[in-house]
């Protein structure tokens, strides 16, 4: 174990050097997104803008949801157009909803599968 310590330290230092270069490059490429001056007041303003922008998007999201529900109702009325492709899309959508729910549950438990913190 002690013989691997210098090797591990060498890898850690190379990651640190490359990580710093990556960090600087990333900030340079995205400097137009950085707010100047970086004050608490400015951060609160951006946070409020994000919140109210998301709240303003709720009606369009609800409209899109009800449009999808309407198309599903029409599909169920006209069962002759119901084929394997549509059944696959419905199954995929259901699977995606389940995956998002399950992922949210895992995140809510602190990224543990059993719910117990180790």
Image: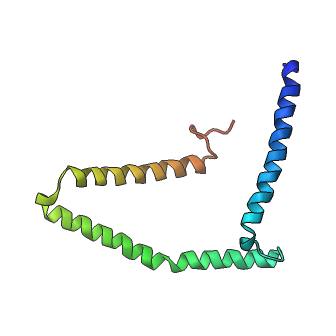
Q: Which residue is drawn at 50% across and 77% down?
A: 57
Residue 73, given in percent of the width and then of the height, sits at: 22, 66
Rendering quarter of residue 116: top right
Rendering quarter of residue 67: bottom left
Residue 11, given in percent of the width and then of the height, sits at: 81, 34
Residue 103, given in percent of the width and then of the height, sits at: 52, 49
Query: Would residue 42 appear left or right of 113 to someone viewing this image?
Result: right
Looking at the image, which is closer to me, 83 or 116? 83
Query: Would residue 73 appear left or right of 79 to someone viewing this image?
Result: right
Q: Is residue 106 shown above or below 1?
A: below
Q: Residue at x 82, y 51 (%)?
A: 20
Which quarter of the figure is the C terminus placed in? top right
Residue 42, given in percent of the width and then of the height, sits at: 78, 78
Which quarter of the figure is the N terminus placed in? top right
Q: Which residue is drawn at 17% across and 53% down?
A: 83
Q: Residue at x 41, y 54 (%)?
A: 97
């Amino acid at each position: 174990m002690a013989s691997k310590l210098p090797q591990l330290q060498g890898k850690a230092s190379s990651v640190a050097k490359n990580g710093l270069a990556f960090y600087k490059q990333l900030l340079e490429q995205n400097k137009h997104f950085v707010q100047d001056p970086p004050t608490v007041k400015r951060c609160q303003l951006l946070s409020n803008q994000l919140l109210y922008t998301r709240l303003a998007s709720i009606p369009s999201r609800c409209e899109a949801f009800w449009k999808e529900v309407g198309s599903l109702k029409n599909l169920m009325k006209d069962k002759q157009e119901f084929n394997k492709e549509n059944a696959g899309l419905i199954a995929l959508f259901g699977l995606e909803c389940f995956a998002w729910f399950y992922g949210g549950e895992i995140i809510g438990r602190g990224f543990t599968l059993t719910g117990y913190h180790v």
